[in-house]
Each structure stands twice: as structure tokens, then as C-alpha cells.
């Protein structure tokens, strides 16, 4: 297998399985569902790939064969990925080995850098005139920065109560900023019907952000020497990370690189906006929109996720669960992480630490097990 060879094959509709060519603009499938990228891994040599990855710089681009980007040497790269795993010394529930995947050190301070790096790189190589999205904040920051680096025009639509520093930083990168009362849903409506042909790269409305976030799973597996933890706790808004990591683990398994069992995913939300948790508990395949989303955990205030059915399937197939936490308890967790662990965790990461505590107290996560908590963004962004 050529070392530089891209193994991506085509786009596949996540609902119907219909295929489409990879190197053409793609947003939602004809069925209105997210496209996913399929890979041709039959005959690929996993051991050789893993050996090549080990020799490369510690960033998400080391996994280039498992990414759909074509012009690797010409990519826009701000140093995304390659984040540390930090073992909790005092906040871990008794007997549970807890590692925190600290994503706050990414460019623009959050894990959104991974997906938006790839989405903007693909928009650039496929000839987009500009890029736009609706965001709770962190995705807007990442889009603005990567578009600036790519020389592409950018537009972001934010709920009007988004912390003001976010809009300022987006403008600093040259992005146009729109605001709307309400949530992401209302902000997204501002982008519809524009005539300038900008590509909309809102969560799951194009195939590449999932692929970028997939690298969290690839990286985690490599960091743990291909032996995944018992549990992965992920703060879930649109759920891109869960969908991406599940694909990462499928692909690594197909390459013969994973040892042991697959992890159980936990979707963590807040009680003021918990559509995935409610659907999980009811046994529903999709999540009804949350009627009155109330939360200041901005990344989790997502009343309707377009990839909800993919997230719910990943939770169920992994034997995982979903948990809504009371956000009033989040500041105390943030303080404890600072004082007891030396960590600066964002509210989304703190929500996961709270869920970990509650699930251990309830006997769901047991002594002797291991868990990885995703700390997805630096609190300074808010
Ligand atoms: C810091 C942070 N964590 C988690 C999320 C939710 O991510 P996802 O949409 O992948 O579920 C967001 C989304 O805005 C975020 O900014």
C-alpha cells in the first residue's frame, strides 16, 4: 500500500446506504440525512499503517490515510489534534481508572478545530467560494480561524446570548457575524437562502466534520496502545464526536489494530436540554426536538441534532447509556478540577466529570473499570 495513499472511497447516505462520489460538493443526502465517508480497507495492512503513523508528527494529520483529504502537502494545518490524556489523581471514583482527553489545547481552544480543519480543507480543495455555519460558539471560532488560514470568506451565525468574546474573535479572523434570538436552530435559519454559494458546514450537514472528529478515536486508541477503555463519556450536542469515534473504532477493527473489547459510550447532556437522553430512555430511534432549551452550557444547548439516530445507535450498540446532569452542580466540579487536579475544564467537560461521579455512585461504572472523559473546550473561550 502506498504510504501517502488515501483509502477513502465514496460518500454513503447514513440512512439509505445510497452512494455518491467523494470529490464533489456534498451536504445532506437525498434522504435529508448526513453523508458518511466510506473507506476501502480490504487488503490494507494495518500493522504497516500503524508503523507509519508512529513516525509522524503528533497531530491529527498523522492518520492521513484514514482521512478523505486529497492534497496532504498543501493542507491548511494549525496544529490540530495530538492532545494529551491526563490521569485523574483525586477526582476519579474509587477504584476507577480515569483519563481525561484534554482537548482545550487545540487551535482556537476546542475539539472543534479537528472537524473544521478538515471541513475547511475539503471546501478549499473542492472550490467553495466561502464557508458558513451556525454555532454555539466554539465551532464559529474554529471556522473563522481555518477559513482565514485557507483564504476563504467565512460567515457565522450565533445565538444572540453567546458570550461576546466569541463574536469579537470571529471578526478578528475576518468572518462576518450574524446573531439571532433563540438557539442554534434560529441562528441556522439566518444562513438559509443566501445567494452567494457559501458552503454550509453546520454540524452533520456535510460529511467532513465527523471525519475530523474521528481522529479523537484514532488518537485515543493509539495512545492506549490499541486497547480501549471500558467507558467513554462525551458531552453531546450534535454528537459528532460519538459518531466519528464509532467510525474510528470500526475502521481500526477492520484493520486488525484493536485489542480487546469496544468501549461503551455515554452521552452526557444537561437537564435543561437533553433530547438524546430522553430519546435513549424512551427507546426511540430519533430524538424529538427539546421544546424549551435552557442551558448556559453552550455546547450542549442543541435542541435537535440531525444525526440523532446515529448517536442513539452508537450508544445502544456499544451497551452504553445517556445521562442528563443538573448544571447547577457544574461550577463546583470546575473548581474541584482546578484545585484537585490542576485542570482548567470547560462546562461541557465538567458535565462529564459530574456524570462520571453519578454513574459510579449508581454502580453503573464499577471499580476495576477504566473511563475516558472528553474535556472538549477551554473555559476561557466563554
Ligand atoms: C466545548 C464543547 N463540547 C461539546 C460540544 C458538543 O459537541 P458535539 O456537537 O460533537 O456533540 C460542543 C459543541 O458546540 C462544544 O463547543
Image (spheres, grey):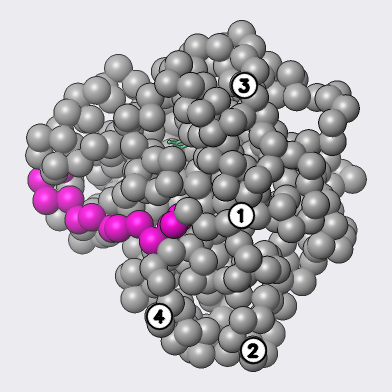
Which element type, helix, strand or loop, lies under badge 4? helix
Residue, disc 1: 118
The CB of the residue at mark 3 lies under 8 Å from ligand 1: no
Is-magenta flag for residue 86?
A: yes
CA distance for labels 1 and 4: 21 Å
In the image, taking residue 61 as reference, residue 70 lies left or right, namely right
Labels in figure, total: 4
> Which secondary structure class fits the magenta region best?
loop
The CB of the residue at mark 4 lies under 8 Å from ligand 1: no
The part of the chain drawn in magenta is: 79-91
Residue, disc 3: 177
Residue, disc 4: 54
Look at discs 3 and 1 and give the one toward the viewer. Answer: 3
N-terminal of the two: label 4 or label 2?
2
Q: Is residue 214 positioned above or below 115 on the image?
A: below
Give whichever of 61, 76 is nearer the camera. Answer: 76
Residue 124 spot, x, y in % from top left: 72, 52
Q: Is residue 319 positioned above or below 253 on the image?
A: above
CA distance for labels 3 and 4: 40 Å
Give whichever of 279, 177 is nearer the camera. Answer: 177
Give whichever of 57, 363 is nearer the camera. Answer: 57
Residue 280 spot, x, y in % from top left: 55, 37
CA distance for labels 2 and 1: 22 Å
Residue 87 spot, x, y in % from top left: 20, 56
In the image, taking residue 375 as reference, residue 295 lies left or right, namely right
In the image, taking residue 285 as reference, residue 352 lies left or right, namely left
CA distance for labels 3 and 1: 22 Å
Amino acid at each position: 500500500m502506498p504510504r501517502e495513499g488515501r483509502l477513502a472511497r465514496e460518500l454513503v447516505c447514513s440512512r439509505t446506504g445510497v452512494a455518491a462520489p467523494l470529490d464533489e460538493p456534498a451536504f445532506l443526502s437525498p434522504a435529508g440525512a448526513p453523508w458518511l465517508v466510506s473507506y476501502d480497507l480490504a487488503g490494507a495492512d494495518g500493522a504497516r499503517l500503524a508503523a507509519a503513523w508512529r513516525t509522524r508528527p503528533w497531530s491529527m494529520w498523522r492518520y492521513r490515510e484514514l482521512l478523505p483529504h486529497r492534497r496532504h502537502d498543501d493542507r491548511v494545518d494549525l496544529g490540530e489534534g495530538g492532545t494529551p490524556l491526563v490521569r485523574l489523581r483525586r477526582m476519579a471514583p474509587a477504584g476507577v481508572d480515569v483519563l481525561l482527553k484534554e482537548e482545550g489545547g487545540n487551535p482556537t481552544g476546542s475539539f472543534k478545530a479537528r472537524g473544521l480543519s478538515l471541513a475547511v480543507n475539503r471546501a478549499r480543495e473542492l472550490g467553495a467560494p466561502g464557508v458558513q455555519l451556525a454555532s454555539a460558539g466554539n465551532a464559529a471560532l474554529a471556522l473563522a480561524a481555518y477559513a482565514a488560514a485557507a483564504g476563504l470568506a467565512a460567515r457565522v451565525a450565533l445565538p444572540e446570548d453567546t458570550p461576546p468574546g466569541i463574536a469579537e474573535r470571529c471578526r478578528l479572523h475576518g468572518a462576518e457575524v450574524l446573531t439571532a434570538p433563540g438557539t442554534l436552530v434560529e441562528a441556522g435559519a439566518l444562513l438559509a437562502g443566501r445567494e452567494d454559494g457559501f458552503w454550509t458546514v453546520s454540524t452533520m450537514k456535510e460529511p467532513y466534520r465527523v471525519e475530523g472528529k474521528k481522529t479523537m478515536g484514532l488518537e485515543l486508541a493509539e495512545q492506549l496502545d490499541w486497547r480501549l477503555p471500558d467507558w467513554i463519556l462525551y458531552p453531546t450536542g450534535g454528537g459528532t464526536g460519538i459518531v466519528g469515534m464509532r467510525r474510528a473504532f470500526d475502521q481500526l477493527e477492520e484493520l486488525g489494530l484493536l485489542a480487546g473489547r469496544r468501549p461503551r459510550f455515554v452521552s452526557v447532556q444537561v437537564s435543561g436540554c437533553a433530547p438524546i437522553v430522553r430519546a435513549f430512555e424512551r427507546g426511540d430511534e430519533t430524538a424529538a426536538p427539546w421544546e424549551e432549551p435552557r442551558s448556559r452550557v453552550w455546547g450542549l444547548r442543541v435542541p435537535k441534532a440531525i444525526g440523532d439516530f446515529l448517536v442513539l445507535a452508537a450508544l445502544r450498540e456499544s451497551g452504553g447509556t445517556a445521562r442528563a446532569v443538573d448544571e447547577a452542580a457544574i461550577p463546583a466540579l470546575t473548581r474541584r478540577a482546578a484545585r484537585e487536579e490542576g485542570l482548567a475544564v470547560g462546562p461541557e467537560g465538567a458535565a462529564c466529570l459530574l456524570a462520571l461521579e453519578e454513574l459510579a455512585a449508581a454502580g453503573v461504572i464499577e471499580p476495576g473499570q477504566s473511563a475516558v472523559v472528553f474535556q472538549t473546550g477551554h473555559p476561557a473561550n466563554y
